[in-house]
Amino acid sequence: MNKKTLSLQAADAIWSSVCIACVLFLVVGASPIAARADAPSTKCDRFLIEKMASAPKSGWSYVIARLEGKISPDKEAALRRCGADIRRRLPVIGSVALAVPSRNLAKLAALPFIVHLSSDEMVKKSDEFTVSSSGADVAFANFGLTGQGVTVAVVDSGIQHHPDLKDGRKGFRVIASANFVPGANSARDECGHGTHVAGIIAGNGSASSGPNCFRTFYGIARRANLVNVRVLDETGQGTVSGVIAGIQWVIQHRTDYGIRIMNISMGHPVGESYTTDPLCQAVEQAWKSGIFVVCAAGNMGRKNATRTPGADNDGWGTAYGTIQSPGNDPYVLTVGAMRSMDGMRSHDTIATYSSRGPTRLDFVLKPDIVAPGNQIISLSAHDGYLVNTYPENVVPPSTYCTAPRSDASSPYYRLSGTSMAAPVVAGAAALMLEKDPTLSPDTIKARLMISADRWSAPDGSWDPCTYGAGYLDIPAALNCSATPAIPALSPTLYVDSAGNVRVNTQNIIWGENIIWGVSGVTDLNIIWGENIIWGTNIIWGTGTLAADPIWTDNIIWGTSTAAIDLSNSVRSGDD
């Protein structure tokens, strides 16, 4: 098998024609340790190392600095001597976001109280099939569950007022809002991405209901409450530190608004281990505070720029190792996107753009689960950036209503991506918590994965790095009684002495082959199938399993860049 590498600069060219993307973050995070005399480069992620190597003489860099201990006047003075300005304080991960002259990066990294530096780059959004293929309609019919009383935080581009987010006389079900976009006057959605995500979670179909309507677009948990945390601007961009500030706000206000779930439909190419990635550290803090965190896997699953006859993944080739941060964190539930082939769930398959595992550097087996995510109709922010820039994705009222609307706008919009699959699972979690409010994040994750329908490609091949534990099955999750005794961490992969890639069960079992200590579940195969994931050298080739291994042509790390925008095919729903 020929080895080749492709830089993410090349990936930029591949995807440059897109709109709906996955958010890019580059971050920091590690436990405070004693001051070290390490070389500055050993404290930095790969992106900053590359920048320092180029010896920039001008320009500014935006970084997230993990500090040893709390910030003090002496430390602030030392930062100022490097020309650094504190842009945000991020105590949830013991860090500060800084702007620093690029020529002073090495000087900043050399400060003894700086534990780690990560690039704080611009971030972008990641993106009735949802209801029927997930089983949400069965959950409503058989259990009467609507998510009522459960609150989901949507960390995104904001949420716009929409009739589908009202609840009769109770009014707007967005019960709180916070804005972390500099220069913005409110948390209102000027993009459209966050409103679309909110509708997938909790839309009640009001604008497509009534005597003149023959099609209604429901969300998964149609009476759930929402908390709007705006971290992305009108074009779906923001900063990592802004996203972390939003997560920090959710943690601080979780009891005020009863927040039990947080949806993050964004991500960035992995630049460091999840153990030091600040965004991963932030979502872990949310998880440990009792919030179930759902993350999009990313939309980078295609290997080729165009369809290639005879290639896999419907001609696009499969880009393994493309899970985005923070979906690479083993705590959170990471979701890939499925597409409908002919309206029958049994024929659904993976969306070609859905990112594949394992995770870069840590080799965590991801995604955890897959859910409907292609050509999803949900709420429209009628004057937002997406509608104005890509009006072809607006859903014509004639497709669901016999009588024309009185205004020229449509309340619905169509998008595709893992951004759309993640909120399907967030809505499913809301139904589970309505049924049993005592569930912990680990129990929700375990039940969703154990109950998922094991899925395979049309040729029958089974690939956990594509489908995870399987396809979301909400009724089965509601009927599942498994309760883990230890954290339900996603496992890592390793290569055995024969060259086979296997699941490492050391950190996910308690006792012989008992997954996460769940009584009654005694076989690892019940979730991931055979623990031999691939035969000899399918992914790792002859390379060694090191921090930056030698990959075969099935995995492309290359050198990452700070911004990727996916192709029009992902935005418009080309599978």
Image (cartoon, grey):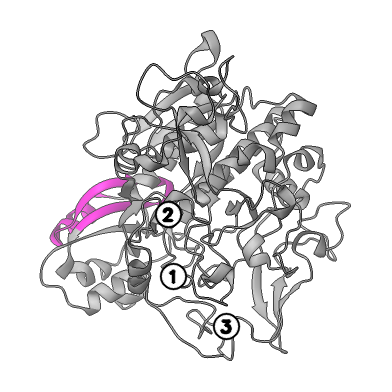
Residue type, numbered disc 1: Thr
Residue type, numbered disc 3: Leu
Q: Position of residue 111 (x, y in %)?
A: 26, 67
Q: Which residue is mark 1?
A: 306
| Left or right: residue 22 compared with residue 468 | left
User: Which residue corresponds to the image point at 72% horizontal and 62% vertical from the top-left?
Assistant: 508
Q: Position of residue 178 (x, y in %)?
A: 37, 31
Mark 3 closeness class: few <14, some 14–19, many ≥20 residues within 10 Å = some
The residues tagged by marks 3 and 2 sit, at their Cα atoms, a distance apart of 27 Å
Q: Which residue is mark 3?
A: 545
Q: Which residue is mark 2?
A: 22
Q: Quadrant of residue 135?
A: top right
* Residue 173 visible in the shown view: no
Chain-order first, disc 3 or disc 1: 1
Task: Provide the secondary structure element on which disc 3 rests.
Answer: loop
Q: Does residue 183 lie above or below 287 as drawn?
A: above
Q: Quadrant of the N terminus?
A: bottom right
Task: Provide the secondary structure element on which disc 1 rests.
Answer: loop
Mark 1 closeness class: few <14, some 14–19, many ≥20 residues within 10 Å = few
Q: Position of residue 27 (x, y in %)?
A: 38, 59
User: Which residue corresponds to the image point at 70% horizontal and 71% vertical from the top-left?
Assistant: 504
| Left or right: residue 486 compared with residue 241 | right
**Tag nearer the camera, 2 or 1:** 1
Q: Position of residue 515 (x, y in %)?
A: 78, 59
Residue 75 part of the magenta-drawn span: yes
Check contact, mark 2 vs mark 1: CB within 8 A.
no
